[in-house]
Amino acid sequence: MEALTSLIGGFGVLADPMNIVYMFVGITLGVLIGVLPGLGGANGVAILLPLTFSMTPVSAIIMLSSIYWGALFGGAITSILFNIPGEPWSVATTFDGHPMAQKGKAGEALTGAFTGSFIGAFFAVLLITFLAPVIAKFALQFGPAEFFAVYLLTFCAFVGMGREPAAKVIAAMMLGFALAAVGIDTVTGQLRMTFGSVELLRGFDFLVAVIGLFGVGEILLTMEEGLAFKGKSAAINLKVVVNTWKQLPKYWVGCLRSAIVGCWMGVTPGGATPASFMSYGLAKKFSKNGRNFGKGELEGVVMPEVAAHAAGTSALLPMLTLGIPGSPTAAVLLGGLLIWGLQPGPLLFVEQKDFVWGLIASIYLGNIAGLIVVLTTVPIFAAILRIPFSVIAPIILVICAVGAYTVHNAGLDIAVMLVFGVIGYLFKKLQYPLAPLVLALVLGDMAESSFRQAMLVSQGHLSIFWSNPLVGSIVTLALVMLIWPLVSMVLARFKAHGSKPAAAE
Amino acid sequence: MHSAIARTIRRGAAALAVAAAFSPLAAHAWEPTKTVEFIVPAGTGGGADQMARMIQGIVQKNNLMTQPLVVINKSGGAGAEGFLDVKGSNRNPHKIIISLSNLFTTPLATGVPFSWKDMTPVSMLALDEFVLWVNAKAPYDDVKGYLAALKAASGDQVFKMGGTGSKQEDQIITAAIEQKTGAKFIYVPYKGGGDVAAQLVGGHVTSSVNNPIEAVSQWRAGELKPLCVFDNQRLPYKEPIASGKSWADIPTCKEAGLDIEYLMLRGIFMPPGASKDQTDYFVDLFKRVRATPEWQEFMQKGAFNTTALTGPEYAAWLAKAEGTHKDLMEKAGFVAK
Amino acid sequence: MNSETGHSGQNEKTVTNRTMDVVVALIFMGVSALVMSDSWRVGASWAADGPQAGYFPFYVGLIMFIASAVTLVQNFVTRHPDLGNFVDRTQLVSVMQVLVPTVAYVGLIFILGIYLASAVFIAFFMWWLGKYSPARIIPVAVGVPLALFVMFEIWFLVPLPKGPLETALGY
């Protein structure tokens, strides 16, 4: 097999001990960047890019991509411990990760998240190794209509009948869409809902909102229930890791599904964030324990992480083969390639064998190294929960403030975050769900612009969404997903005929 | 400073850069006393961002500054956020900004009040070229064939022009072609130049006006072909890129029968109220950046127009460019009421 | 989680869940009106080449308005209005104990810069709510901002908001 010999060559490139050192440095920095909300993989890579100037391209990409792997791993940590998503793609991890931590299962949740990340990455890198050219062709099929279909599918997969009143679910989701529309409209260049304010030109960033809604909101809710974090009794030894691993094999179907979703979204630039939401939504719909999702199911932690990491990893594929970035981090890495004097694109695999296969080999090693690094830190992180609330709470709030600021280097974002914190608290108490709001905020913009691009292409004809088998089947699948909960609800009603309607929680 | 120099000069430039690194820095009347912020009025990963980080790397590697240079993205409102930040930082010499065409287009298209006159011009670094690209499978090989097909197209076949952003450089060029030929395009705005090139390869749009660096890899791979360059003279880079053709072989649009010229500014500005000594420091800094071999290579890879102006010539160029943009955008109806 | 009315005595009463629900629904409706009016301004119809810039936001606003109106009406016509206590007085006090200092902290960031404000905030919080001794407070209150400073300003070269102290020190 040609790919296999090339891969072995790639491992040869890695044999240089300096490259291994760079890898560990990158991963450690990446985990740190992932932990700090606001600083994302893209920032981390961009900040360190100039440093790599004096390295060989192979060493440089190994270090920078390792930062990326580290950030992918690290994003889950604060999501689980404090309900603060360190990265956009770990929002879905908070849904079950934080309830697990509150139940004293922080160790299990962290292990599940890290292992899930690793599984996702491994699946994606296998794909890159053996199917790169085929996949690249597939990515080219995606025009505006197809992109919109993907966003629609994400939506329909995620949205289901929750426990909250329907009117409130809808209101919250619409609020998310409205917030996403603030700022400049990419299709016409008009300003929307800025009301003449310079600060509003930026729009509302998803991360700022999420740090407030989840992080600050959670602290307020915790205060209400007394000065303590729940889950202090978390077991903090490595035995937890082994015990969690024993539970994982039974989720193999879900893992496979999430990995496929992740790879797909990574290759056709949908990104890790939609991938994690879609995968969580699918798992909730199809799992036997779906009803318990949101209350601390291990499966609900593993699935979004598998998808996020698979998407993050496979996002490198269109970058290398087509020169289009599959994620913001990939966009910065792409700039790096140019700075190091490499030309990304279809010929890179032919002309720069050492570089490409060195990079691919480093994905294998980097993720194994990453898994080892983060797993050994599980006890340390779980122990953070034992720090008294009156010490850790102000530190968390400081980190939230720093995170909100660094997203756009904007002081006002700190105040915006605080407002979202209060909104998060009120919503939680009044049974407005946060997840649809957040999903609408992150996807609203992209979905709208791809829809309108498609409309420009078709000159206003909706038939473009059924104009070829690819887009047609995605849209149809999405609509089926949307109706699915209604169908199953009707079926359930028939079955449960006579019994009392579900009592309030 | 005309630029085909690439290799011959590169060695000399390398020696120069080394000399610059080891010799004591030339005495300046003013030097930064703290970290200098380098504002990019665009997101991470775009052309301006790449150039800024490239400069940051060159400065760091060759020890061109005693204080750190830090890149900060302020992309809100099509870059308005970054320019307004600089405009509001009166007399702060520790802040510089790299511009792209949005310096001219954003205030016109959105009505957000700023202009180059609100800042202190430092130096033009280069001009970015625009090339008319079509899919390699397109039935025409030159501008004449393209224009004929464009005019003949109707209904479903109307040409779709993919571009970056709305009412910015790509759409301005598209509107200029419409005005010259009387034909109509459907302009489809995307987020970044890389996306546009990929959409063109995938056949979702008919043509694009990508910058060279955004589409060169697809050209080399035989997926796209260039028709003409929107400059008044051919590009000087003679190194073959794809099937024996080099950048220098692409005709200018004017000689090919489409009389349109458009170049995008890559220039540096300081906040208003900067003193002569302060601007002199940065003028000199960027002169040294441009002399490094890394910069030369970057210019060649991206097929940049390496015109670099400072002082009154730079200001004159800016005034002229502002007028051209105003004119083009008014004609196209892109100006906010 | 919401109506923990079991142990709330007369003096624990603040507002009912229904009142809060109505207030929030009204705020929602206000926001919707704002969204709709601005979208109308930029154009909210379906032009020949697809929806205009305000098309989606307008209908988003409209749906939000209707949904909130439903919530509002439900609160009045239901036979079992949720008259439970929204938040107990003691709970409200604890929430305010965090919220008020945090608001002050965010205000301080704009005056003192983030590092000094963080030190003050952490110290105050530990002293006020944790009743720690200065020997415990000072290492944390100084150490955390210092670590952030090293990490952001020196290591990652990301400038955070700074105030007079940092300027005096040459940053």
Image (cartoon, grey):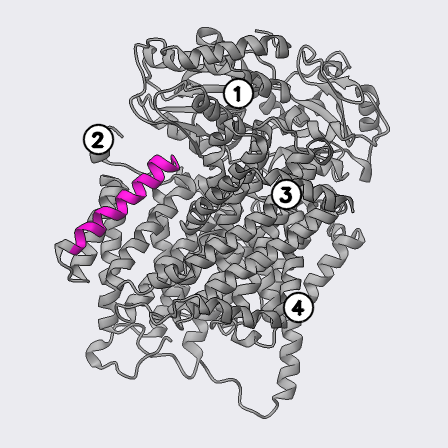
Label placed on residue A253 = 4
Which range of residues does the magenta coloring cover? C136-159
Give the SS element for disc 3: helix
Residue A84 location in percent, x, y? 41, 57
Q: Give the left or right position of residue A114, taking residue B32 as reference.
A: right
Asked if badge 4 and badge 3 are on a common chain, one would say yes
Q: Residues within 10 Å of mark 2 (few under 14, many from 20)?
A: few
Q: Identify residue for label 2.
A: C169
Confirm whether the magenta stretch covers residue C157. yes
- Kindly report the distance in space between the C-alpha atoms of the residues bearing marks 4 and 3: 31 Å
Q: Earlier in the sequence, mark 4 or mark 3?
A: 3
Q: Are marks 1 and 4 in contact (CB under 8 Å)?
A: no
Q: Main secondary structure of the magenta part?
A: helix
Could you say which disc has been placed on residue A164 in the image?
Answer: none
How far is the residue under mark 1 from the one under mark 3? 41 Å
Residue where numbered disc 3 is placed? A11
Chain holding disc 3:
A
Q: Nearer the viewer, residue B133 or A167?
A: B133
- Residue type at the position of mark 3: Phe
Crowd class of label 4 (few under 14; some 14 to 19; many from 20; radius 10 Å): few
- Label 4 sits on a secondary structure element that is helix
Q: Nearer the viewer, mark 1 or mark 3?
A: 3
* Circle 1 SS class: strand
Mark 1 burial class by Cα count in 10 Å: few <14, some 14-19, many 20+: many
Would you name the residue on which mark 1 appears? B266
For mark 2, name the chain.
C
Q: Nearer the viewer, residue A311 or A275?
A: A311
